[in-house]
Amino acid sequence: MAEHTIENALSADNLPKHIAVIMDGNGRWAKAKGKARVFGHKAGVEAVRKTVSTASRLGIKVVTLFAFSSENWRRPEDEVSLLMELFMTVLGREVKRLHKNNIRLRIIGDKTRFSQRLQKKIAEAELLTADNTGMVLNIAANYGGQWDILQAAKRLVNQAAENGLTAEDITEDMLVQGLSTSGLPEVDLLIRTSGECRISNFMLWQMAYAELYFTEQHWPDFDEQSLADAVAWYVNRERRFGCTGEQVQALLQK
Ligand code: IPE
Ligand code: IPE
Ligand code: MG
């Protein structure tokens, strides 16, 4: 067995391959500052940038960020439209930077409910970065875990009809292939900010064995140190080592 050293603990094998994040608490962060919720959403963009850059530098294979749930349409109309606008602007502004960093961007969720303009922008961004070989960045937008499983089941039914398959022919792998994350490793580490301890219909199938990490920090305050702490917590849980966030951060200097 390999020696219990920090170097071994922090080798790529022990780091989570897929990190999923429920970016929560933008509204509360803004409220605590006496500002409108919108201000929190805008501040949250900077935390996204830091998380993507840190994860990519750590050599994480896949990051999935929950940006807008299928339930979030129930929010006040002006907040929804602001979030859509923000999504448009950020997509336009950030995609070149992602491409330069060899990151493959994918938007997962039911895209049909978005405006034509936004759908076009999404398709362009996905196409531009499609051949990149670095980290995969999934942005979950109008996403729901139940929706994902349902749409995979529907694909399976069509496939079965086309190929004359019966219920006995259906395997777990076939269903997984229809999920929005097909071809990617399952989630190893789920992070949820802002103190809420629930899954909120995020990647239900993909998180079957994930370690769940909840932090009180609001999303706009989440930074490099926060991600390093979460990764260190994961490594320690999985491998029973005692490494620290600082030691994970030291990997970034290499
Ligand atoms: C997360 O922050 C962002 C989205 C869900 C779009 P919230 O907007 O949920 O912030 P809180 O939970 O109200 O503080
Ligand atoms: C979950 O956050 C969805 C996103 C982070 C996009 P919410 O704030 O919408 O979740 P609930 O409503 O508190 O469960
Ligand atoms: Mg919330």
Image (spheres, helix red, strand yellow):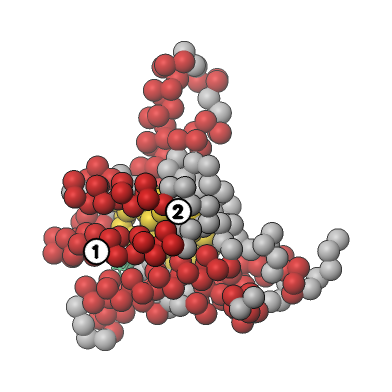
Where disc 1 sits, the SS reads: helix
User: Amino acid under label 2?
Assistant: Arg
State the residue position of label 2.
104
Q: Earlier in the sequence, mark 1 or mark 2?
A: 1
Q: Position of residue 197 (x, y in %)?
A: 44, 66
Q: Alpha-carbon neighbours of circle 2 within 10 Å: few (<14), some, or many (≥20)?
A: many
In the image, taking residue 153 as reference, residue 3 lies left or right, namely: right
Q: CA distance from mark 1 to mark 2?
A: 18 Å
Residue position marked by numbered label 1 in the rendering = 89
Does the closest atom of ligand 2 sit within 8 Å of the Cβ of label 2?
no
- Closest to the observer, 155 or 76: 155
> Which residue is located at x 22 percent, y 55 percent?
73
Q: Position of residue 4 (x, y in %)?
A: 81, 71
Q: Say which residue appears at 35% left-offset and 60% top-offset.
A: 95
- Specify the quadrant that holds the C terminus: bottom right
Ligand 3, by image quadrant, is: bottom left
Q: Secondary structure at mark 2?
A: strand
Q: Please tell me which residue is depicted at 34% across the width and 52% down the height of the picture.
A: 125
Residue 163: percent from left, percent from top: 46, 15
How many tags in the picture? 2
Viewer-nearest residue: 165 or 8: 8
In the picture as drawn, the residue positioned furthest to the bottom comes out as: 33
Q: Is residue 87 visible?
A: no
Q: Nearer the viewer, residue 191 or 105?
A: 105
Position of 247 relative to 165 (above/below): below
Dot 1 and dot 2 residues touching (CB under 8 Å): no
Residue at 44% x, 73% y is 50
Q: Amino acid at mark 1?
A: Thr
In the displayed structure, does residue 113 sit left or right of residue 251?
Answer: left
